[in-house]
Image: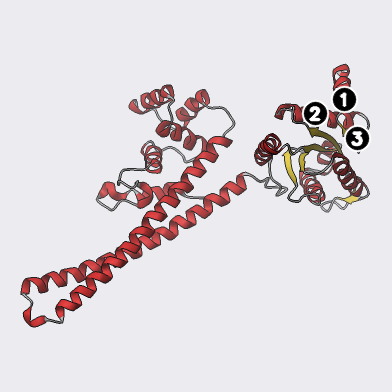
Amino acid sequence: MKIDIKNILDSFTNEKDGGDACPVCTDRQGKPSTLFEIGDFITRHNLSLGPKNLEQTWEYVCGNNQALKAELDQAASTAELNDETAMEIYEKYFSDDLNERIEKIFLEAIEQIHSTQEIISTGNDNAIKHENQMIKQADHIRGKRGSVDKAIEKLLDLSRVMVESTRENREQISQTNEKLAKLQNELEVARSEADHDKLTQLPNRRKFDKVLDAAFQRLKEAEQPFVLAFVDIDHFKRVNDTFGHECGDRVLRLIADQLSVLSNNRCHISRYGGEEFAILFEGEDFDSVLHKINDCRNALARKSLVDVGSGQPIGRVTFSAGMAECLPSDTKSAVLRKADLALYNAKSEGRNMVCTYSQSSENRRISDS
């Protein structure tokens, strides 16, 4: 999925050449909008429309980082602002985590589209109302043709031309509105894609972080506890090394499907990274969660897999899991560490098992290190 925003902005900024301004590029007062300024900066300096350039330009236009603005202005004034220098400046001022700022850009774009659609819709309604009134009055006067002055006749003709012109403009605006709706849909699809792992189709770590934050908020407000589990495929490197990465990808999808059986409105499953998955259970007691994950592990362990590419048997593929209950006194980092320690124990005690966190888990990790 690709959104050609640069092409859209170029077509919407033709007022520089005497054309009409596009609604998405202007605010209610007809002044250039935030999206216009961002697009203008990127186009003016011939920068590629990537996430880092978009993020940095957003900060330049909307942010308060004066040092960043001064450095970009300096590079622009000496004609040295290009993709290479922009990335050098970016590395100085931004971290690698783009999640929050990209989300902000998405939301701002969608808000701009909503606002534009409202303006267009209101303008449409008013135009139709005034057109009908004008036509009605014009027809009424024309009915008394004998007593009407030639100047009024010309005025009536002009009124009809204006009405026809307004209707043509309204049709163009309607087409623009359709384009905006399509763009909004593409943005929302992009947001969904940004939250999901392409290989397994499960939510990714970015989405998991949001779900975990929401779970902590519910724990704080309603004292609703939750259970966190980490699942890691046993000896996954051996599968990749022996049968290749395509086979490894198929194994990942198989285990993702196996874990997805647990998923419901109280259970969120994500691909946390590599061969590791994160599962968050809300509103279920700890023993019930332990039973469900064990059932899932046993069901997988009973399968005997074959590589469809070579026809060679892979044999059993198993996973290990570590579980921890989040208490009201826990922080986000604390519950993540507890689940990670439980997973470490499952791995160190022989794999293909589910271990739960306890203080002895903490003590064992310390003694091993």
- Lower position in the chain sequence, tag 3 or tag 1: 3
Could you tell whether 46 is left or right of 226 in the image? Answer: left
Give the quadrant of residue 288: top right
Front residue of this view, candidates 307 and 204: 204
Front residue of this view, candidates 226 and 35: 226
- Residue of label 2: 338
Label 2 to label 3, Cα distance in Å? 18 Å
Under mark 2, the amino acid is Lys
Label 3 to label 1, Cα distance in Å? 15 Å
Disc 2 is placed on an element classified as helix
Label 1 to label 2, Cα distance in Å? 8 Å
Could you tell whether 144 is left or right of 183 in the image? Answer: left
Q: Residue at x 27, y 65 (%)?
A: 166
Report crowding for label 3: few under 14, some 14 to 19, many 20 or more residues within 10 A (C-alpha): many
Under mark 3, the amino acid is Arg
Residue that protrudes farthest toward the front in the picture: 222
Query: Is 342 located above or below residue 364 in the figure?
Result: below
Q: Position of residue 125 (x, y in %)?
A: 35, 63
| Discs 1, 2 touching: Cβ within 8 Å | yes
- Residue of label 3: 351
Could you tell whether 319 is left or right of 100 in the image? Answer: right
- Residue of label 1: 361
